[in-house]
Structure formats: structure tokens, C-alpha cells
Image (cartoon, helix red, strand yellow):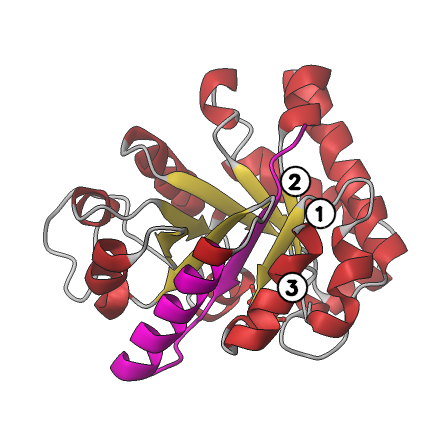
Amino acid sequence: MRKKIVAGNWKMNLLLDEAEKLNASIDETLSKGNFRCDVYHFIPFIYLKEAIDNSKHVQIGAQNGHPEKNGAYTGEISIHQLAHMGTQAILIGHSERRQLFNETNDFLKAKVNTAIAEQLTVFFCCGESLEQRESEDYEQIVINQLKSALFHLPEEDFRKVIIAYEPIWAIGTGKTASPEQANAMHISIRAAIADAYGNSVAETTSILYGGSCKPSNAQELLTQSDIDGGLIGGASLKPEDFMSIISTYQ
Ligand code: PEP
């Protein structure tokens, strides 16, 4: 059985009191129900400590982190610092980091290595742009992202990684991949994992879908054969929407 996961990516949103309220609200609702999935919040650095100290049911992750342990990197926060503070997970390879902050495959690989060494759960994001989707080899483009920054890991470490397939054309645009389109890509990703690590690893790797997932389409997307959960942006900012998506796995 693959682990089902629903993760919220708050991005650069919410003020302190809003962040505290949202995290507490989800944590409390989870304490009352019986949900068959793990729930994560990827939140801004400044809210991590409070959330880590107060969450019992939501696992708390960072949206970024620097691979070097410490040093002259003004404005950066190291993965080592995050781990030391109790952060449980990290997003690596999000398309906004790749596109807006020019993060390269080599840099992502370095982050993956440090995060694994620091025992954080890596959520590795991959996905193609609209232009790439319109080309014939978009599947290979996504698989190359995995090959370049992830598939160097030994099997024992790769087993700890969660993959999020996020077509860039569907992130924050309101355009969602159809359940069939998303599932087809998940099947291809799983096949690539099987090539790299064998079937048993592929069959136990959780692959999440992300991109305009919301209450109205979550049920259909998140119950496809090869979709093991969702990475949720906009809809994770409203407790009722996020809980509605989580309830897919109730
Ligand atoms: C994301 O940024 O990871 C994401 C999936 O965003 P949205 O749900 O808003 O498309």
C-alpha cells in the first residue's frame, strides 16, 4: 500500500495570526477525524518554529533551504538549521524556485543530498511548461528532471523521497490537468522509477499531483490509480477547502 499524502504549499502568503489560525484549525480537525493520509504544511520560514511546537497531526515542512551547512550566504537559511529546529520535510525543485530563482539541477541535487543527510523528508517537484507539454517529448523532459537531481540516490535513500508531479501550466492558473492526463504522467514517472530502482521501489513510492487542485476536482484526481495524494497551493490557504481535499481519504 502506498502512503496517501495531502500537503499544503502556502508559498509567500499569510500574516502571523492567519498562519497560526490556519495551522491550528487543520491540526484540530485532524485530531477529531479518521483520515487515511499524512498531512503536511509547507510554510514560510518565519512561522516554522511556532508550527513545529504546536502541531500534533500536521507535519511541518519548509519551502526551501540552502544545501551548505553554514557560511557567508546572506539571507539564506540552511537545511541543517531547519532540521536542527525540528522541521520534518522540505520542498525541492518547485517550478517557482526553478523559474524565478534560476535553481539548476545541480543545485537541486545538492539540496536533495543535504536534506537526506539531515533526515528531512524530501518532496521533489517535477513538471513541464506549456511549451514543453506541446512538444512531443514532455514526458522525457519530466523524467530527465528526476534523473538529473534524484536518481543518483542509493535505493535506501530514494525510498524516503516523495515525488510531486506539477505541470507548470496548471499551477495557480486554474487550469487543471485532466485526471487521465495526470494519471498517465504518474504512470510514466513510476515506470522510470522502476527502471532506476526496480518494481518494488516504484510500487511503494508516493507520487502526488499538484496544479489547481481544489475541492471540486480533488476527488476525481486523487483517486486515480497512480495518484497518491496532492500538493495544494491556493486551496490550502482556506481551512474548509484544504479539509475538503483531505477528506478524499477519509
Ligand atoms: C503549487 O504551487 O505547488 C500548487 C500546486 O499551486 P496551486 O494549487 O495554486 O496551483
Name the residue tied to disc 3.
245
Q: Which residue, as the protein is rendered here, is positioned at the far front?
A: 32
Give the vertical position of 19 relative to 122 (above or below). below
Q: CA distance from mark 2 to mark 3?
A: 30 Å
SS at badge 3: helix
With 100 as the anchor, is 125 left or right in this view? Answer: right
Give the vertical position of 109 relative to 16 (above or below). above
Mark closest to the chain's N terminus, 2 or 3: 2
Q: Quadrant of the N terminus?
A: top right
Give the vertical position of 148 relative to 173 (above or below). above
Residue visible at 72% across and 79% down in the picture? 174
Give the vertical position of 21 relative to 154 (above or below). below
The residue under label 3 is which amino acid type?
Ile
Front-most of 103 and 205? 205
> How crowded is the residue under tag 2: few (<14 C-alpha within 10 Å), some, or many (20+)?
some
Q: Which residue, as the protein is rendered here, is positioned at the far left?
A: 71
Q: Which mark is residue 144?
A: 2
Name the residue tied to disc 1.
141
| Ligand 1 location (quadrant) | bottom right
The magenta region covers 1-30
Residue visible at 30% across and 73% down in the picture? 20
For marks 2 and 3, give the one nearer the viewer.
Answer: 3
> How crowded is the residue under tag 1: few (<14 C-alpha within 10 Å), some, or many (20+)?
some
Q: CA distance from mark 1 to mark 2?
A: 5 Å
> Is residue 12 covered in magenta?
yes
Q: Is residue 93 visible?
A: yes
The residue under label 1 is which amino acid type?
Ile
The residue under label 2 is which amino acid type?
Asn
SS at badge 1: helix
Residue visible at 27% across and 61% down in the picture? 51
Q: Are marks 3 and 1 in contact (CB under 8 Å)?
A: no
Mark closest to the chain's N terminus, 3 or 1: 1
